[in-house]
Amino acid sequence: MSAALVAGLLAGYGVAIPVGAIGALLVGLTARTSFRTGAAAALGVATADGLYAFAAVLGGAALARLIEPVATPMRWAAAVVLVAIAVRTAVSALRRNGSPVDDRGLTSPGRAYLGLLGLTVLNPATIVYFGALVVGRQADAAPDLLSGIVFVLAAFIASASWQLLLAGGGSLVGRVLSGPRGRLVTALVSSVVIVVLAIGLLPG
């Protein structure tokens, strides 16, 4: 059981710690809104990681093979959505003089949660990552339902803790750059970073 716990924690941190476009979006979103909204977005990311870990425990390599044919369209979809969010954020910041509050965007906790959940689900590399780990674990020992549940929960907790840490960093940035000019700079910088990282999602 402890082995499943450690494996789940390592898997969760392994997939969460590399800060990509989603991480940049999370930090920028929290800086421009509130920690409450950022925390909801962070839990959306962690929920997607947990769902993929659960799917990997259930299906493992078979699910990874199922997703492989649509992996490229999923990456394109994620990149397009991220670029659209980045452009919208920048345009809104310029129009509103650094205070990009828009009820139609990700500025409420519920929408932030669902938005980041959906974006993270579009990353097929996550299921491949968890699938490989689960298959590797099953090669060493017979599959066990309880250890699988512990693995999934540990992966979710690890991912959630890291994403909440990123949200906390975004909240600190928002407090330091609380004026209109600071919010404008935050929005524009995060938009550029998100676009660059989103392009990196595209297949080579």
Image (tube, grey):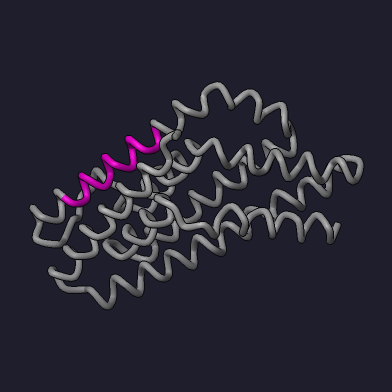
Residue 193 or 54: which is nearer the viewer? 193
Q: Quadrant of the N terminus?
A: bottom right
Image position, residue 191 (x, y; %): 26, 53
Q: How many marks?
A: 0
140 horizontally vs 193: left or right:
right
Q: Residue at x 52, y 29 (%)?
A: 71
In this view, 2 is above or below 85: below
Residue 44 or 125: which is nearer the viewer? 125
Magenta span: predominant SS is helix
Residue 203 or 37: which is nearer the viewer? 203
Image position, residue 19 (x, y; %): 47, 57
94 horizontally vs 122: left or right:
left
In this view, 194 is above or below 162: above
1 horizontally vs 70: left or right:
right
Q: Residue reaching furthest front?
A: 204
Q: Residue at x 13, y 68 (%)?
A: 180
- Residue 24 occupies quadrant: bottom left
Instruction: Confirm whether the magenta stretch covers residue 83.
Output: yes
Q: Quadrant of the C terminus?
A: top left
Per the rendered image, the range of residues in magenta is 77-90
Q: Residue at x 73, y 34 (%)?
A: 60
Q: Residue reaching furthest bottom?
A: 176
In this view, 30 is above or below 105: below
Q: Residue at x 75, y 51 (%)?
A: 151
Image position, residue 106 (x, y; %): 31, 49
Instruction: Confirm whether the magenta stretch covers residue 121.
Output: no
